[in-house]
Amino acid sequence: MNLNTQPGLLRERLFPRAFQTVAAARAFTRDTLTTWDLTDRRDDVVLCVSELATNALRYGVPRGRAYRLRLLNFGCCVRVEVHDSGPGLSRITAGPPGNGLLLVAGVADGWGVLPRRPGKVVWAEFGPGGC
């Protein structure tokens, strides 16, 4: 999907590498969805933002760097993107250390990972049939 050709609204914010920013990312998401009057699945979206931000901090954001949270409103769906500069691509693994991506896969209508330079974008979509 080429996001540059899709109509919609975009809100984004950079968060520094600190686990305290996960709460700020959740609040930013709640506020944005309320502003857009998209509250039906707000708890699902906030849960996924929390998991994706935590994963970015744990595995994808080198010291001194930040992660970017993007929220896109396409009318029929919302897309969440967490951009980080860490190596590798996120994937679901069996067992510990956590099950964050299993939660995302179970709650979102779609999710995936895209490479970028440097790092990756982990995204999740909420809406009938995805975005």
Image (cartoon, rainbow, N blue to C red):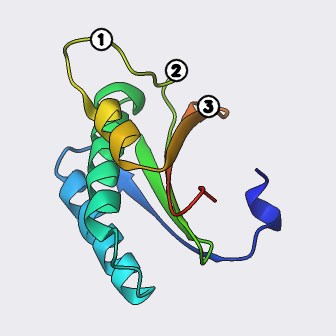
The reply to whether callout 2 and callout 3 are in contact (CB within 8 Å) is: yes
The reply to whether callout 2 and callout 1 are in contact (CB within 8 Å) is: no
Residue 22 is left or right of residue 9, and the answer is: left
Between the residue at mark 2 and the residue at mark 1, the CA separation in whole angstroms equals 20 Å
Q: Which residue is mark 3?
A: 118
Q: SS class of the residue under badge 2? A: loop
For residue 94, which numbered disc appears in the image?
1
Q: Amino acid at mark 3?
A: Pro
Which corner quadrant holds the C terminus?
A: bottom right
> In the image, what residue occupies the spot 52% across and 20% down?
87
Q: Which residue is mark 2?
A: 87
Q: Residues within 10 Å of mark 2 (few under 14, many from 20)?
A: some
Which of the two marks, 1 or 3, is nearer to us in this view? 1
Between the residue at mark 1 and the residue at mark 3, the CA separation in whole angstroms equals 26 Å
> In the image, what residue occupies the spot 59% across and 56% down?
130
Residue 76 in sight here: yes
**How far from the left and from the top, in percent, is residue 91?**
45, 22
Between the residue at mark 2 and the residue at mark 3, the CA separation in whole angstroms equals 7 Å
**How far from the left and from the top, in percent, is residue 98?**
21, 24
